[in-house]
Image (cartoon, helix red, strand yellow):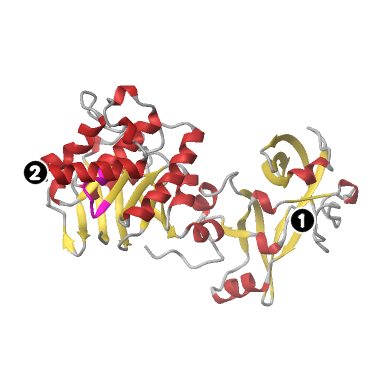
C-alpha cells in the first residue's frame, strides 16, 4: 500500500506524433502538450478516479504512473521515492487494461500465475495467492478454461485477478468496464467497491463514464484537454462545480444553462433571465460581495432535478412577468416567478420522468417524480411554465466560464 505524488507532471509529444482524438491540446515549440502541470497528492489506500472526455489525457497520466510512458517534465513519487526513471516492473504496480490483455493460449490459472512466475515466487505461494484471488472474484470454477471460452465479465474478473495476485502497492485500472453492457457494468462497479474494501490498496482508476467516477471515487480528478479542471469528492464536484465544463460534464441529465445578467443593489444580488428576476440567497450574496463581483453578463446553471414546473394558467398575456403557482403535487414556492416554455418529449425512467422542453431559445431538461408527472398530462407542443429557487442557481462568468460562487480550485 502506498501514497502517490505527482508534481508538475507533463507529457509532451513531438508535433508530428500528436495522439489521435486530441485536437484541442496546446501546441508549443516543444510539441503537443497531452498533459500539462498535473499536480495530485494521493493518500495511502485512497480511491482516485481520473475522468473526462476522450483525449483529455487521463490514460496518458495513468501510463506515466505505470512507467509505460516517459515523463516529459515533473516528478512522480511512490511512497516518497522518486520513480521517474524506475522501470515498470520495479514500481510494485499492477494495471488492468481496457481490452483485458489476457494470453489466449493460457488457462485462467496460468494467466493469473504468470506475473508471479516472472518474479520467481515460490510455487506454494503462487498456488495460495491464485486461489485467494479466485475466491475473492468468484472465478474458482473458471481456472481451467481459456479466455476464449469466457464472457466479457468473466474475462474482466480474470484480468483483475492477475493484477491483484501480486499484492501491488498501487492498482491502476484503465477503463476496465467500457467493453461491458450496462447491466454488467453496474454489477462490476459493485464488485470493485467490495474488492477495494478487501484489498486495502491504493486505486487509481480512469474512466470517461462520470457515473463510474461518482460511485467509485473517494475523490475525482476532472480533466479536459490535458489540464485538471477540478479535484474534489463526488459531492463537491456535483454541488460546487468550479467552471462551466465541470458543471456540464458532471450530472445526468446535464445541467441547464441560461444566459442572464447579474444585478446588484447594495449588498444584494439578483439574476435576470428574459426580464424575470431571481433573487440570490444571502450566502451567495456574501460570496459575491467578498469577491467584489460587479454587474455583468452571466451564465446561470440549474440542475434538471431543481426545475419546478408550474401551472400554465398562472401565466398572463404578459408572459414570464406573472407570478407562478406551484402544481398541487409540489411544495409551495411562494413568490417564485415563472418562465414560459413548450413541452417536447418525455422519457419514463422508472421512478422519475425526464421532460425535454424548449425555453429561453434552447433545449432544456427537467427531472420530475413519476407520480407528479401523472397529474400533468403534458403533451408535445403544449405550453408550460417553470421556475427554480435562488438557492439552486449555479453562477458562471460569461467571459471566463469560471464559477462566481466559489474560490478557484487550487491544483
Q: Residues within 10 Å of mark 2 (few under 14, many from 20)?
A: few
Please report the bounds of the magenta region as a residue range: 163-170
Q: Nearer the viewer, residue 410 or 353?
A: 353
Residue at left 52%, top 49%?
Answer: 250
Residue at left 21%, top 27%?
Answer: 106
Give the alpha-carbon distance from disc 1 to disc 2, as whole Å.
74 Å
Q: Which residue is mark 2?
A: 120
- Taking the image as shown, residue 144 lies to the left or right of residue 81, namely right
Residue 331, position in %: x, y? 80, 59
Q: Main secondary structure of the magenta part?
A: loop
Residue 22, position in %: x, y? 35, 38
Query: Residue lying furthest left in this view?
Result: 120
Dividing the picture into quarters, in which one does residue 130 lie?
top left
Of mark 1 and mark 2, the one earlier in the sequence is: 2
Dividing the picture into quarters, in which one does residue 34 lie?
top left
- Where residue 102 is drawn, which disc sits there? none
Q: Quadrant of the N terminus?
A: bottom left
Q: Nearer the viewer, residue 67 or 344?
A: 67
SS class, disc 1: loop
Residue 401, position in %: x, y? 52, 55
Q: Nearer the viewer, residue 21 or 332?
A: 332
Q: Residues within 10 Å of mark 1 (few under 14, many from 20)?
A: few
Q: Give yes or no for residue 164 being in the magenta stretch.
A: yes
Residue 242 appearing in the image:
no
Residue 233 appearing in the image:
yes
Residue at left 58%, top 45%?
Answer: 254
Q: Is residue 284 above or below residue 219?
A: below
Q: Give yes or no for residue 277 being in the magenta stretch.
A: no
Residue 190, position in %: x, y? 46, 46
SS class, disc 2: loop
Q: Which residue is mark 1?
A: 275
- Taking the image as shown, residue 111 lies to the left or right of residue 231, namely left
Amino acid at each position: 500500500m502506498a501514497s502517490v505524488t505527482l508534481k508538475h507532471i507533463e507529457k509532451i509529444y513531438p508535433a508530428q506524433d500528436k495522439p489521435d482524438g486530441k485536437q484541442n491540446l496546446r501546441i508549443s515549440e516543444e510539441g503537443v502538450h497531452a498533459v500539462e502541470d498535473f499536480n495530485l497528492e494521493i493518500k495511502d489506500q485512497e480511491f482516485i478516479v481520473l475522468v473526462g472526455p476522450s483525449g483529455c489525457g487521463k490514460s496518458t497520466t495513468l501510463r506515466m504512473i505505470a512507467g509505460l510512458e516517459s515523463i516529459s517534465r515533473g516528478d512522480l513519487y511512490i511512497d516518497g521515492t522518486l520513480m521517474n526513471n524506475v522501470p515498470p516492473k520495479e514500481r510494485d504496480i499492477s494495471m488492468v487494461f481496457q481490452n483485458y490483455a489476457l494470453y489466449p493460449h493460457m488457462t485462467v490459472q496460468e494467466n493469473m500465475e504468470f506475473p508471479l512466475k516472472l518474479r520467481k515466487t515460490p510455487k506454494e505461494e503462487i498456488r495460495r495467492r491464485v486461489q485467494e484471488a479466485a475466491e475473492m472474484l468468484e472465478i474458482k470454477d473458471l481456472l481451467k478454461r481459456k479466455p476464449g471460452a469466457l464472457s466479457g465479465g468473466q474475462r474482466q474478473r480474470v484480468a483483475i485477478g492477475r493484477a491483484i495476485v501480486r499484492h501491488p502497492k498501487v492498482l491502476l485500472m484503465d477503463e476496465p468496464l467500457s467493453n461491458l453492457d450496462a447491466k454488467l457494468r453496474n454489477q462490476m462497479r459493485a464488485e470493485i467497491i467490495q474488492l477495494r474494501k478487501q484489498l486495502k490498496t491504493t486505486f487509481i482508476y480512469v474512466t470517461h463514464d462520470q457515473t463510474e467516477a461518482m460511485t467509485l471515487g473517494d475523490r475525482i480528478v476532472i480533466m479536459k484537454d490535458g489540464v485538471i479542471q477540478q479535484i474534489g469528492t463526488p459531492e463537491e464536484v456535483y454541488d460546487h462545480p468550479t467552471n462551466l465544463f465541470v458543471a456540464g460534464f458532471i450530472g445526468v441529465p446535464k445541467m441547464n444553462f441560461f444566459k442572464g445578467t447579474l444585478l446588484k443593489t447594495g449588498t444584494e444580488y439578483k439574476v435576470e433571465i428574459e426580464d424575470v428576476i431571481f433573487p440570490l440567497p444571502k450566502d451567495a450574496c456574501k460570496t459575491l460581495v467578498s469577491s467584489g463581483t460587479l454587474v455583468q453578463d452571466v451564465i446561470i446553471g440549474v440542475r434538471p432535478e431543481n426545475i419546478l414546473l408550474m401551472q400554465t394558467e398562472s401565466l398572463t398575456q404578459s408572459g414570464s412577468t406573472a407570478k407562478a403557482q406551484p402544481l398541487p403535487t409540489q411544495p409551495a414556492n411562494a413568490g417564485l416567478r415563472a418562465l414560459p416554455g413548450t413541452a417536447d418529449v418525455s422519457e419514463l425512467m422508472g421512478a422519475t420522468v425526464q421532460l425535454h422542453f424548449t425555453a429561453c431559445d434552447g433545449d432544456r431538461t427537467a427531472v420530475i417524480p413519476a407520480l407528479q408527472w401523472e397529474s400533468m398530462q403534458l403533451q408535445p407542443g403544449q405550453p408550460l411554465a417553470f421556475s427554480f429557487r435562488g438557492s439552486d442557481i449555479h453562477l458562471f462568468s460569461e467571459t471566463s466560464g469560471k464559477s462566481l460562487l466559489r474560490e478557484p480550485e487550487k491544483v
